[in-house]
Image (cartoon, grey):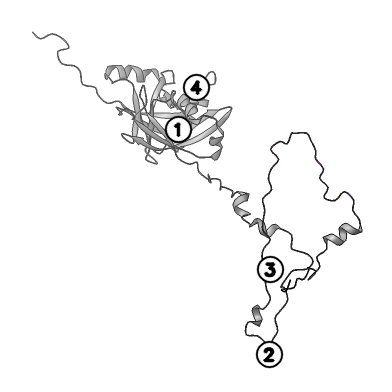
Amino acid sequence: MFGFNMFPEIPRPFNMIYKCHSVAMLPGNERQDVERGGKIIMPPSALEQLTRLNINYPMLFKLTNKKTNRVTHCGVLEFVADEGKVYLPLWMMQNMVLEEGDMVQMESVSLPVGTFSKFQPLSPDFLDITNPKAVLENCLRSFACLTTGDVIAVKYNQKIYELCVLETKPGNAISIIECDMNVEFAPPVGYKEPQQEKKEDEEMAVDPADLMPEPTGFVAFRGAGNRLDGKKRKDSATSDIIPPKPVYVRGIPDYDYQIGTLRFIRRSTKPGKESEESSQFRAFSGTGFSMKG
């Protein structure tokens, strides 16, 4: 005779239809732990049936809204719901377009272990978080699986941030229980990269000589040329000689300067008539010499 359990029992699928409600409708104390995660609450009869069907662990389920054909995946947190009812997080009901008392189909599934996921915040406010990866990692501890296209809710500092699951690998639905998964972020919806302001040095690229004051007083060879016969010169349009730019001489810094000291420099100690006359330019005031000696 053959002994018992010679052939292991093949797991049979779990397929049931329940009325769904949000966690806020669950009798008793407020369950914020359910709202922050991706797990649901099922009735005790579901646990008995799952045990008889020899379901593989961890228990993962596929939820389907037959009216809209919306699909998502979840885990189970407790089996304390009223018979015939399941309680879902509010963000999950919104993803599946479910209202209080709508029917939802539940099937047991086996999902591959996730290796990669990409999220897109639905608001630029998510960038205000100092370490968004650490916040998301802490939030995903309350999730059993992820589904591409879902919009999950992350609560941080009394504020709820919504993130869209753009991509998951190696499949459209993955298990994230005890796995090493790479996480990436896409630019938030409505985010605009700040435009780099040009430096003032680049905008004010001006020759220092142009900033020098214009020469005052007499300027040699600045007059216009004329012909003896009275006719206009061919280059009369450009006859005005443009004076050369003053040479820009860069000053030498005082390397011995001490902070807190003031130095007053005066060019002339005794201003008077002589100094004013000497500073004025006089044309052809040089001394003449004879070639004969």
Which quadrant holds the N terminus? Answer: top left
- Of the image marks 4 and 3, the number of the one nearer the N terminus: 4
Q: Is residue 265 magenta?
A: yes
Residue that mark 2 sits on: 231
Number of residues whose C-alpha sits closer than 10 Å to that of mark 4, classed few (under 14), some (14–19) or many (20 or more): few
Percent across and percent down for residue 215 are 75, 63
Q: CA distance from mark 1 to mark 3?
A: 80 Å
Q: What's the magenta region?
A: 246-270
Please name the residue shown 87% across and 62% down the image. Answer: 277
Number of residues whose C-alpha sits closer than 10 Å to that of mark 2, classed few (under 14), some (14–19) or many (20 or more): few
Q: Is residue 73 visible?
A: no
Q: Can you say whether 64 is above or below 140 in the image?
A: below
Q: CA distance from mark 4 to mark 2?
A: 101 Å
Percent across and percent down for residue 171 are 31, 35
- Of the image marks 1 and 4, the number of the one nearer the N terminus: 4
The amino acid sitting under disc 1 is Met
Residue that mark 1 sits on: 92
Q: Can you say whether 238 is above or below 41 in the image?
A: below
For residue 33, the mark is 4
- Of the image marks 1 and 3, the number of the one nearer the N terminus: 1
Q: CA distance from mark 4 to mark 3?
A: 83 Å
Q: CA distance from mark 3 to mark 2?
A: 25 Å
Disc 4 and disc 3 in contact, CB within 8 angstroms? no
